Image (cartoon, rainbow, N blue to C red):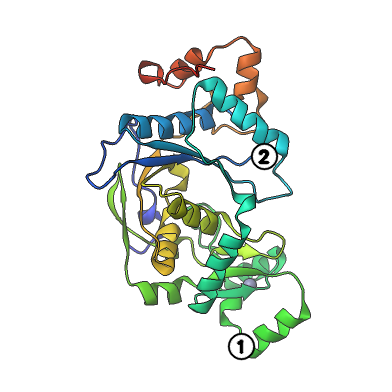
Amino acid sequence: MSSPNSASAPSLRGPDHLPAPFPEEQPRVTRFAPSPTGYLHLGHAYAALFAYEAARFAGGRFLLRLEDIDRHRCRPQFAEAILADLSWLGLAWDPPLRRQSEQLEVYAAALERLRELGVVYPCFCTHESMRREVEAAGFAPHGPEGEPPYPGICRRLGEAERARRLRRGGSYCWRLDVERALALTGRLRWFDCRAGEVEARPELLGDVVLGRKDHPVSYHLAVTVDDALQGVTLVTRGEDLFHATHIHRLLQALLGLPTPRYYHHNIVADSRGRRMAKRNRAVTLRHLRDQGRTPEEVWRLLGLGERHPQPASV
Ligand SMILES: [Zn+2]
């Protein structure tokens, strides 16, 4: 069980099915959480429709969150376009709309809490120093996401050296010390609607980055905090994020947050079987609309035509 291959995501293939409500879901709350770094494409439309339908099917609420913290890549016009494209598709979200860029104090407080627990450490590595370390070790173990997990160089720094480097004022990030965190929480589990009960194995991803100087919070920390604060009961997202859930479950335990259920759905591929990319204009909703396609055609294209939502009435 220790080889990385045996830990690859369980086969989630097969058609997606909307999960029936769980007894304590009163009501179900789902969310769609895009980053405004480009126009929405068919892959996003599938994720949005799935979350929307999973909520409506259970008589619940569907929330929208803009993951707009990365100020180098996010653009206000893309945020506006997301709202317009979802409205065009007929997906009405329940208020309030959450913008991560307006919640930075909340994430800073969560990071501070983790620092108090002693489960984060500053990392001063550059890409170059990590590459040298991996080469010197003579092998590069690959995590489930293809990248080798962080080799732990700065985890081994003494307190005095840490303090000296922090005073020096260069660039650094905060990493989660997965081993120390697991020592506090013990082994954890989470529930995936397709894979069943899953043992959390955050060590597969290693000491992930939780925040950095020019980017105050990472995806992992922000999404965990937001899902809890927004009362999300069912997290629906693409199966490419299956392994990220190991880390999110650990962060929930450390921060005393509730654990939602998860549904990691299929990823919509393009006609050549590749994952869709924002830079491919042909699959954006905007382009399809300009070509005269209707929302109904988009739903059919996504295989959701039989149970599509009602078009927006305004
Ligand atoms: Zn480091």
Residue under the point 45% across and 28% down: 49
Which quadrant of the render holds ligand 1? Answer: bottom right
* Of callouts 2 and 1, the N-terminal one: 2
Reading the image, the residue beneath label 2 is 37
Q: Residue at x 41, y 64 (%)?
A: 250
Q: Position of residue 66 (x, y in %)?
A: 58, 42
The residue indicated by pointer 1 is 159
Element on which disc 1 rests = helix
39 sits left or right of 6 in the view: right
Residue 131 in view: yes
Residue 204 locus on image (x, y percent): 44, 61
**In-front residue for pair 210/107:** 107
Q: Is residue 38 above or below residue 68?
A: above
Looking at the image, is 184 positioned above or below residue 279?
below
Task: Give amino acid for label 1.
Answer: Glu
Q: Amino acid at mark 2?
A: Thr
Q: Quick check: 280 left or right of 168?
A: left
- Determine crowd level at label 2: few under 14, some 14-19, many 20+ residues with C-alpha closer than 10 A: some
Assess whether mark 1 and mark 2 are in contact (beta carbons under 8 angstroms).
no
